[in-house]
Amino acid sequence: MFGRIGRFSVTRPWLTIVAWIVAAVALSALAPSLKSTDDQADFLPSHYESVQAGKLQERSFPQREQSAATIVFQRSDEGKLTDGDKAAVAKVAKGLQDKKYEKIKQVTADPSAVSPDGTIAIASVVAGDKDVYDEVIVDGIKTMRQDAKALLEGTSLKAGFTGTAATALDSRESSGNTDGMVMLATLVLIIVLLGVIFRSPLIALLPVLIIVLVFMVANAVIAFASDLGGLKADAGTSAILIVVLFGVGTDYILFLLFRYREQLRTGQQPKEALIEAVGRVGETIASAAGAVIVAFLALLLSTMGSMQAMGPSLAIAVAVTLVAALTLVPAVFSLLGTKAFWPSKAWQRQPKNAMAHRVGGLVSRRPGIVAAISTGLLAVLAVGVFGFKAEFDMGSSMPKDLESVKASKVLEKGFAAGETDPTLVYLKSDGGAKLDAPALAAFRASMAKTDGVGQVSEAVTNPEGNVALFNVALKYRPAEEKAISFVADTLRDKAHQSAPDGTEALVGGTTAVLADIETAVTHDYKVVFPVAGIAILIILGLLLRSVVAPLYLLLSVGLGFAATLGATVWLFQDLQGKNGLLFMLPIIVYLFVVAIGTDYNILMVARLREEVARGTSPKEAARLAVSQSTPTIGAAAIILAGTFGVLMLANNSMLQQMGFAVAFGILLTAFIMAMLLVPTITTLLGDKAWWPRRPETGQPSTAAPVTSHEPEMTAGSASR
């Protein structure tokens, strides 16, 4: 099948290329815009309490004011506020209110909103829209900051903005144009590395141009799929999508080009060599892409909407890349023939590859020792995984010199840490009857006595009087682990137990959402991991026609996953002193390292199977497979790891963690597992590795005489 696909693309290159260009332009022009959200509450299913509380708010308090930001005032000398200072606070708040920012309902300064020690005052910025992440509101906070500086001139005060919209603003500006930075750095990295590997400007540039075309098609298909399926794209998906497309796309192109060059060195004509290369590695590329696709689709089983949205998007991107690798890439290179390698002549002679031959020799001579050392190294790194702590506080990943971060620290000195984003406790009557005032007071008093609660507001009832809302300011920052644990266990239990007869209590707000996300992620660990693993196992079994080889392949990659996560824990938690790692990191590492990293294992074991099918002994098969595959795997892994490593340039520790973990995991998979562990285990098992059927000998060539619809470009014509 893959030989036929290669033949069509190679003999009809212009038809294939024009079809791709037309598809890219048409789809990009017609595709709807992707809808994006930063609000994690949008990504939880309806059975979680925080979501139920949000729905109750929409029904009972549709016009409820939402706190967009908090302005924190203090004297420049950090002393006690005077009466003049307090009057200046009120004047600044009124000045900002009079400017009437779009979607900002009001800016208020309550005279009583002064810290007990008299050093800090606060003013509230109230949004006129329930979505405080709205771009208009966030931009309004940006303008308001500048206006506040002007209003503070001539006073002894300084002020800082914190809270939800202010934090969103700082997050956006601190990361800068992350997508653009990732795209540029990725392009430069790929071009430079391809240029060094092939010493050809065409091969350095062509894959990038091909992948840009694939990126256009993939983005459009994702937009159509999201529109039809009602999926929301998480705000961070675009940067990951860029890395996946360029990283995986370059991998598949390298798999094909290395095999193409190998066939040319046997004396085949360029078109025949290209068809042979597609036929030989087409199944390997398809299997590798299939493993990645099913792993990403396993995210559909996640309870997190962000994961559910990311999974299909990345799966579509990889599927489009697979089609391009089997059609567009052969078509482009069939037009160029050996001119693609100009000015280098290295394609005409067998490379020395001294290092690859030494590694192959070592693997074949000392398989037991190499396997033991490789396993031991991975096991030592894996120990660190036991220290993993999930971090849900996205603000902790932001630079400490940002205004929202500094203002939050000042606020915590004088008020409850949760003042800017209180937990919302709702009390509703079961039968729709009006709530009793004494019962509400008793409920409020019970909540206020809970250790960990800073203060509880008076009850605010809806017009019907059957639902009451209490703002509960915690003593902890809303997104820190203490707050999340407190809300998930103590506060919810207290609210449920203290609810008067005939009423029901629901706990919502940011901290409650994070508590439910923690529960959802724990569920996902138990469901997504095994499903993705089983799916990859099935694909490996179909590729290798074996039961044994897929099992030890998946086990080795699982060990690599643990080693990757353990190394990340040691680097960021132990050495850098981070409180924890991105809560989604285990899922991301599992999917990217197990799925994408399996590409190299698949390439190696497919080559092992090919050598065994020729009748060579297990040791000789390992030597030849490692010698032939090491340059391809090494080059592909360095480029792919480099593209993910680009994320470490972001001014955000969460992206840095993701970049390091995936890049390190890919390098482990390539250089330890694919080059050392997999071939040594295969050698030690011998024919048992291919049970129940040993690969058949004498595999025929997939190439046949070419009947071209284009002028034939021979090696001789290419050199002229």
Image (spheres, rainbow, N blue to C red):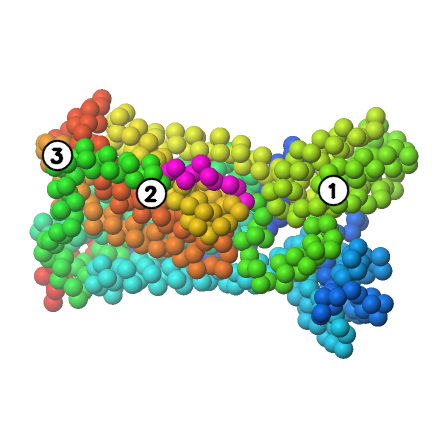
Which residue matches tag 1? 453
Q: Looking at the image, is mark 3 or mark 2 earlier in the sequence?
A: 2
Residue 469 in percent (x, y) is at 80, 41
Which residue matches tag 2? 597
**Front label number (1 vs 3):** 1
Q: Looking at the image, is mark 1 or mark 2 earlier in the sequence?
A: 1
Magenta span main SS:
helix
Question: Is residue 468 in view?
Answer: yes
Q: Element at badge 2?
A: loop
Amino acid type assigned to the residue bearing label 3 in the image: Lys
Residue 352 in percent (x, y) is at 11, 53
- For disc 2, the neighbor class at 10 Å (few under 14, some 14 to 19, many from 20) is many
Alpha carbon of mark 3 to alpha carbon of mark 2: how far? 24 Å
Seen in the picture, residue 634 relative to 287 is either above or below; the reply is: below
Alpha carbon of mark 1 to alpha carbon of mark 3: how far? 67 Å
Residue 532 in percent (x, y) is at 42, 33
Q: Is residue 334 left or right of residue 382?
A: left
> Looking at the figure, which quarter contains the N terminus?
top left
Q: Looking at the image, is mark 1 or mark 3 earlier in the sequence?
A: 1
Which residue matches tag 3? 619
The extreme bottom residue here reads: 154
